[in-house]
């Protein structure tokens, strides 16, 4: 059984993933799988070359992420095509890994940490979706400290994501991460007790 774990930038998904792993749950990370599927020699690179040209590959065979980002920046059609190709590769790889894991852990709930889960429409593949949420000001403050980005840069990124209201309406479980670590831990324990 696959449960989705999502939340906006700075909400605390990675922190919740860590708590769940410490409690013995398997959590796959879509961003990590994204790095795997775009590594040198991966079949996805051939599809990206077909779509965006051979210049996106460096001399050493690695993907030139900056060039690819520059090529697609501000072009909705290209961005959609890129997202579609990369997301499909991530989903295929993740489903394969979950399937393999379920052979040894047949009844165990496994989590899939996907920052843009609703935006990608992957909620339809999840048994449940757990949303980690926090007030925008708290999220901005956390990301300012963590990544050294400006408030305006973070607000821009937030505007590209689905609103918290919409995600909250759709989620099966809401984990409020508006306090410290002790409060977050008790929220996660409550979610586990009530849903698993
Ligand atoms: P992103 O989508 O931007 O990667 P995220 O949702 O994975 O973010 P985290 O990386 O888990 O968020 O959290 C953002 C920052 O806030 C981290 O530095 C984390 O340590 C800190 N943080 C998260 N929750 C708490 C909390 N309850 N108390 C204190 N610090 C927290």
Image (cartoon, rainbow, N blue to C red):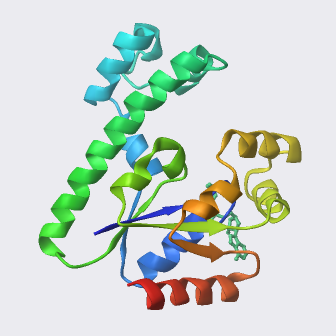
User: Residue 191: x percent and y percent?
Assistant: 51, 84
| Residue 44 in which image quadrant | top left
User: Residue 59: x percent and y percent?
Assistant: 41, 15
Residue at 61%, 68% in the rendered image: 132
> Above or below — where is 25 with respect to 63?
below
Residue at 44%, 12% in the rendered image: 52
Q: Let me know if residue 67 appears in the view.
A: no
Left or right placement of residue 90 versus residue 154 in this view? left
Name the one closer to the observer, 95 or 23. Answer: 95
> Above or below — where is 24 with respect to 169?
below
Residue at 87%, 47% in the rendered image: 151
User: Residue 143: x percent and y percent?
Assistant: 75, 56
> Above or below — where is 43 with respect to 183?
above
Left or right placement of residue 191 versus residue 140 in this view? left
> Which quadrant is home to the C terminus?
bottom left
Name the one closer to the observer, 187 or 36. Answer: 187
Q: Let me know if residue 27 appears in the view.
A: yes
> Which quadrant is home to the N terminus?
bottom left
């Amino acid at each position: 059984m696959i449960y989705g774990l999502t939340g906006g930038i700075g909400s605390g998904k990675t922190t919740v993933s860590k708590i769940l792993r410490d409690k013995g749950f398997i959590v796959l990370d879509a961003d990590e799988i994204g790095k795997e599927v775009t590594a040198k020699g991966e079949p996805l690179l051939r599809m990206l070359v077909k779509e965006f040209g051979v210049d996106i590959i460096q001399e050493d065979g690695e993907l030139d992420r900056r060039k690819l980002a520059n090529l697609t920046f501000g072009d909705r059609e290209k961005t959609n095509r890129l997202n579609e190709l990369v997301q499909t590769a991530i989903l295929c790889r993740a489903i394969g890994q979950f399937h393999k894991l379920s052979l040894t852990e047949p009844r165990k709930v496994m989590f899939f940490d996907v920052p843009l889960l609703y935006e990608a429409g992957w909620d339809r593949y999840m048994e449940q979706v757990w949303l980690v949420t926090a007030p925008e000001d708290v999220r901005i403050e956390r990301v300012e400290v963590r990544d050294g980005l400006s408030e305006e840069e973070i607000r821009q990124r937030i505007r590209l994501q689905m609103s918290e209201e919409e995600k909250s309406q759709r989620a099966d479980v809401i984990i409020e991460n508006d306090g410290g670590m002790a409060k977050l831990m008790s929220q996660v324990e409550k979610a586990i007790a009530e849903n698993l």
